[in-house]
Amino acid sequence: MNHPVLYPMQLSPVCRSTIWGGNRMRDCFGFQTRLENIAEAWMLSARDDNPGFIVNGEYMGLRIDRLLQDAPQLLKKGNTDPACPLLIKFIDARDKLSIQVHPDDAYAKAAGCADPRGKTEMWIVLEASMGAELIFGTTQAFTQDQLRRAIEEGTLETLMKRVPVRPGDVFYIPAGLIHAIGGGILLAEIQQNCDTTYRVYDYNRRQADGTLRALHIDDAVACSRYFTDAEIDDLRYERGDRSSLADAAYFHAELENVRDSRTFSVGEDSFVSLLVTAGAGVLTHGDTDYPLRAGDSYFLPAGMGEYHVRGTDGAVTLILSRT
């Protein structure tokens, strides 16, 4: 495809259900599904296992991953690799998630993971019940032997650093940091396009069929490490822009609250993921208006140029992510 059409492409959510999932996304965003709950909604998913579909315009009905196979330059000018580097999600944790960790690029490659990259991610808390908390690393440094012994002896939770959360909190989670989302939290997640998770501990919960969920202790121990807050902060702003949510090696993310009309631009160096987290508005590109509602996701292709956003009946809140 030599000359693809450049316009804001609205994407369908890819909903997934788990034992810890809730149903806030039905209430907050109006997502419809026959699933028992909506634990995750993959809002930008250019993956062949769980692909999002384009629901408007020239490419309506086409899977976003297949469009990128035909036109990888939509990710950035001159690009020939159709693999989208980012995966954008909403996550609704009615109950706490397992204590887990993700590999970095080197470990994922050496281990022969299905996804050939690691998983560094970031959370933006949208809603949190009273008393909600998450696990964000450990309270002290540890060796692999100490971590394994804590898992085997059932004392792992005593090493975890628990952090209370409220809406608006942001957490940057480098690959290798042990973490877990607590119950009662709705958040947006920006991450490398990787679905590799090593469960360290899952509170001995049983699935619908009565079995325990699988743990991945050897891999988890091998790729886990201790991070200081300063180390995490340096990685979060590795490229220097501390006015943003993150300006890291793998992605740049900004939070925008728009009431009056504002102008943005998508350059040729990267696509932009536009995720609406609250409010309502209108995106104008050229002579066409595109509605913005809480829960909407748009893929803005590289080189699309200027677009304008205004809130309607108040402000519209956006997370803008790019590589």
Image (cartoon, rainbow, N blue to C red):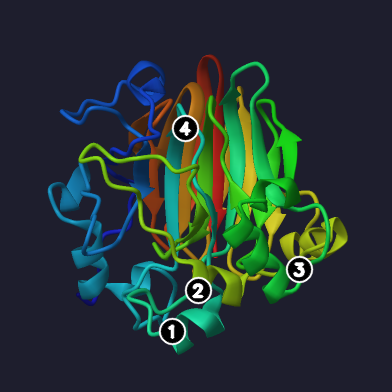
Helix, strand or loop status at disc 1: loop
Disc 4 residue crowd, few under 14, some 14–19, many 20+, Cα 10 Å: many
The residue wearing badge 1 is: 111
Pair 1/3: label in front: 1
x, y percent for residue 213: 35, 51
x, y percent for residue 249: 65, 71
Disc 2 residue crowd, few under 14, some 14–19, many 20+, Cα 10 Å: some
Q: Does 311 sit above or below residue 165?
A: above
The residue wearing badge 3 is: 238
Residue 176 versus residue 154: which sits nearer the camera? Answer: 154
The residue wearing badge 4 is: 93
Pointers 1 and 3 in contact (CB under 8 A)? no
Pointers 1 and 2 in contact (CB under 8 A)? yes
The three-letter amino acid code for the residue at tag 4 is Ala
Helix, strand or loop status at disc 3: loop
The three-letter amino acid code for the residue at tag 3 is Glu
Q: Earlier in the sequence, mark 2 or mark 4?
A: 4
Which image quarter holds the N terminus?
bottom left
**Cα–Cα span, label 3 and label 4:** 30 Å
**Cα–Cα span, label 1 and label 3:** 26 Å
